Image (cartoon, helix red, strand yellow):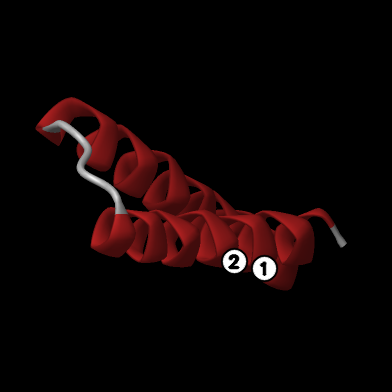
């Protein structure tokens, strides 16, 4: 159940950051931070799902 939450949150963060970048000007640090957090959550969700499948 946690992996679904992380997966959805990661997708939302990445997509919202892309939409906001289209309309507003952000510096590179902010763009990278938002993309990194989103991708990190996606990776965490995949790793958790993989560990529960092996158990």
Q: Residues within 10 Å of mark 1 (few under 14, many from 20)?
A: few
The residue most toward the left is 28
Q: Secondary structure at mark 2?
A: helix
1 vs 2, front mark = 2
- Look at 81% across and 54% down and name the residue there: 2
Residue picked out by circle 2? 50
Q: Position of residue 38 (x, y in %)?
A: 45, 50
Q: Nearer the viewer, residue 26 or 43?
A: 26
Relative to 30, is 6 on the left or the right?
right
Relative to 19, is 49 on the left or the right?
right
- Look at 33% across and 63% down and name the residue there: 18
Q: Secondary structure at mark 1?
A: helix
Image quadrant holding the N terminus, namely bottom right
The residue most toward the right is 1
| Discs 1, 2 touching: Cβ within 8 Å | yes
- Look at 39% across and 53% down and name the residue there: 39
Can you tell which quarter of the image residue 27 is in?
Answer: top left
Can residue 45 be seen from the camera position used here?
A: yes
Up the image or down, 41 lies above or below 14; here it is: above
Task: In the rendered structure, find residue 54 and report the number of the disc placed on it.
Answer: 1
User: How far apart, in angstroms, are the residues tagged by discs 1 and 2?
Assistant: 7 Å
């Amino acid at each position: 159940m946690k992996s679904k939450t992380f997966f959805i949150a990661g997708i939302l963060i990445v997509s919202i950051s892309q939409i906001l970048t289209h309309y507003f000007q952000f510096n590179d640090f902010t763009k990278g931070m938002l993309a990194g957090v989103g991708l990190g959550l996606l990776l965490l969700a995949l790793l958790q799902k993989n560990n529960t499948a092996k158990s």
